[in-house]
Amino acid sequence: MPLKAIVEGETIIGPDLSEEEWTKLKSRHKKGLPIRMGCCGAPGHLRISKKGTQHFYHAVDTGCNYEEESREHLEIKYQIYRICKSENWETSVEFPASDRTWISDVYAIKDGRKIVFEIQISTISPNNLEERDKKYRNEGIESYWLLDNFLERSKAFESWYYAHLYEEDDRLRETIPYIDNSIFDTGPENHIFIAKGIRSVGLNAKNQTLFTTNNPEIPLAVWVREVLKGNYQNYLKETSVTYHHKRQTKILAAPLLIQFREFYQKIIRETYRKKVDSYYRIFKKDKTLREEKTLQKKFDEIYSETDWLGKEYHSCIAESNGLFRWKKIPEYDKPRPYFRLESELKIKKLQECVKMFNQWEASFNSAFSNLEREFLADKRRFEE
Ligand SMILES: [Zn+2]
């Protein structure tokens, strides 16, 4: 429902008229003074909403979009308009672009800063939102979308965000180990801003209140003032900077963490350990073979080396070492280690760890092949 009409060639904003002016206009209109709608120029009439907001409505259904605007939409639009004006912003409502490709709900200018507020109560597709926002961006206008309960599209916005976050995993074709992705968890306004650069806020149209990730109920007036002061935009930007920093650290750490896990799986848990164990079982079962003192010594050595490497691994991954944080998550019974994506310094330290393990692995490899060669030769010799 529009707040704006044209009377005798002049644009009038309903709520701006005093009660007396409004009554006067109404009686003149009754006597035949034409009123044209500000949105489409169709004939219109005057009316007062339940909450007392003076506004206009189309005399006949012309198919104008503004006819479908709800009462809530009208009230919120009027509130925002009023607050912007009281903060000394040059403000208009239902403001059209020069080429009429958009009409914004509230448009406010001050010191070269241009802001639009868009109240979106009816559903709009994420792509449509992106397209409409682009029009404002192209004209250097700061746009803010009040999305009614995020239009029940939080999942779509979340998938924009996580597609962005997991780009690197997709590129590496695997999930990066030791990453606690819950540190990236946040809410829809940040998802939308980080993935698409669109400024939005959750709207509870019924109560005329707003909400964000950390704040379940913000009075409309408080939020609008924060927007005008630039604080809301700063909040979105700061969250985005923090996210990008963490993501960048994750990308840097990814190849190192993958190597680190490979090392663990190869030496500590799986491949080598199992091979050594299976050779040792054969060795122990065979009466003649187990008399081979040098071979026994080699087994002892390789076992002590594996134990030592295991200890090194565990001290590297221990909470006290400062590189990993142990955390219990619902999917697992026991706490698990997660790399601290905190600073470049941690990455450097991890790099040193991985470098060291690579050297140890090389020397372990040669000791193992040595043992394997001798074991197989002895085995063959005794079998003959
Ligand atoms: Zn219209």
Image: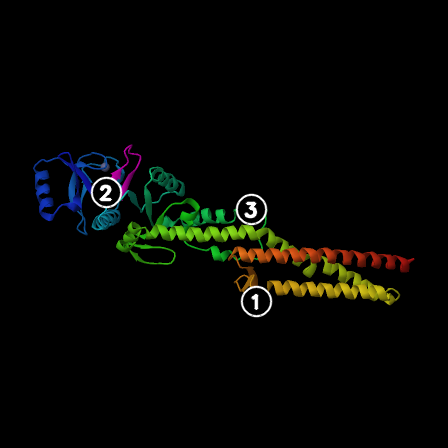
Q: Amino acid at mark 3?
A: Asp
* Figure quadrant of residue 298: bottom right
Q: Which residues are magenta?
A: 91-110
Q: Amino acid at mark 1?
A: Ser
Which element carries disc 3, helix, strand or loop?
Answer: helix
Quadrant containing the C terminus is: bottom right
Alpha carbon separation for disc pair 2 and 3: 45 Å
Label 1 Cα neighbours within 10 Å, binned few <14 / some 14-19 / many ≥20: few
Q: x%, y% of residue 119? A: 30, 46
Q: x%, y% of residue 225? A: 27, 53
Labels 1 and 2: the sequence-earlier one: 2
Label number found at residue 170: 3
Which element carries disc 2, helix, strand or loop?
Answer: strand
Alpha carbon separation for disc pair 1 and 2: 59 Å
User: Pointers 1 and 2 in contact (CB under 8 A)?
Assistant: no
The front one of 221 and 111 is: 111
**Residue under numbered circle 1:** 320
Residue located at (54% from left, 47% from top): 168
Q: x%, y% of residue 115? A: 29, 44
Residue located at (21% from left, 50% from top): 86
Q: Amino acid at mark 2?
A: Val
Labels 3 and 1: the sequence-earlier one: 3
* Figure quadrant of residue 275: bottom right
The front one of 261 and 252 is: 252
The front one of 209 and 205 is: 209
